[in-house]
Amino acid sequence: MKTGLVLEGGAFRTIFSTGVCDALIDLGLDCDYLIGVSAGIAYGVSYLSGQKERNLQILTQYVHDKRYMGIRNLLRRDNRSYFGLKFAYEEIPNKLIPFDYKAFAAWPGEAEAVVTSLETGKAVYLPVPRHDDHFLLLQASCAMPLLFPTFDLGDGPVMDGGAADAIPFERAFEMGCDRVTVILTRERSYHKKTERIEPLIDFAYRRWPAFCDTMRRRAERYEEQREKLFDLEREGRVLVIAPKSTEGFSRVEHDLEKIHALWKDGYDQGMAAKEELAAFLKPRA
């Protein structure tokens, strides 16, 4: 049986997912295939390298650091992102809170990240390089419109994977997974609405009409995905873990108590669901 783990994005709400993944480390559970979107894959690689609480440490230590995020970063011509890209994707993992590249390289499964092609508006699924000290693919997957520059990974400009495929459980099944665990970053009762900034996105990315169309249909697509996901859960083919509540939690949340609480919700839910998770995943080697 091939096991899959799917990690939704959601910027700092993804700290919930890291709580679940930290529980998986404590429970000694692994997967054959992992796919993540945006912060889902950016945080998810620390699970694959077996580094418990690494993401929590990064977020709580640097959330108030202007080098990590802030409007000044967005205004810098060499950065053009709300986040300090070199600081977040190079200095932190390579110097300050080191990422274990060797452990990640030794992980025996498959890991993919999702990006969205600006030219086609469609999702592109790419294998995560086992040693990239710039984390370029992860940057591209996290590249939220208006808050990041575009990225070219060799086949044209791409951005945030969540634009085209926010919860890529269908990709996991396409890759041969028999059972799939999906960690959401929104509560089960959540319903997505069209972004108020859509006119600004239409203007900023007018060179890429297919991408703009994908962004306009993003909420509709998201609702359809969740409906299908919950149907699969009822059929027993998918295990879904979702936060109890994300009300009042910003995608760039600064409140350390809220961050710890959402991480703990994920960790506690992971530990409580150990029997179900053991049925959908496999022992860690």
Image (cartoon, rainbow, N blue to C red):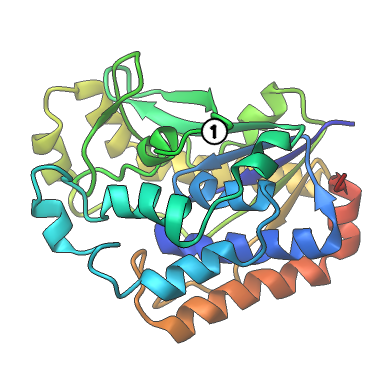
Q: Is residue 72 left or right of residue 184?
A: left
Per the image, the residue denoted by label 1 is 131
Residue at 80% in and 65% down = 26
In front of the other: 7 or 57: 57
Position in image of residue 21 (x %, y %): 68, 58
Q: Is residue 275 left or right of residue 103?
A: right
Quarter in which the C terminus is drawn: top right
Q: Is residue 194 visible?
A: no
Bin the neighbour count of mark 1 within 10 Å (Cα to Cα): few under 14, some 14-19, many 20 and up: few
Residue at 47% in and 81% down = 258
Q: Is residue 246 left or right of residue 159?
A: right
Question: Residue 268 occupies which quadrant of the picture?
Answer: bottom right
Asked if residue 278 is positioned above or below residue 236 in the image, the reply reads below
Position in image of residue 113 (x %, y %): 52, 34
Residue at 53% in and 62% down = 55
Asked if residue 193 is positioned above or below residue 119 in the image, the reply reads below
Quarter in which the N terminus is drawn: top right
Position in image of residue 95 (x %, y %): 44, 55
| Name of the residue lying farthest toward the front | 95
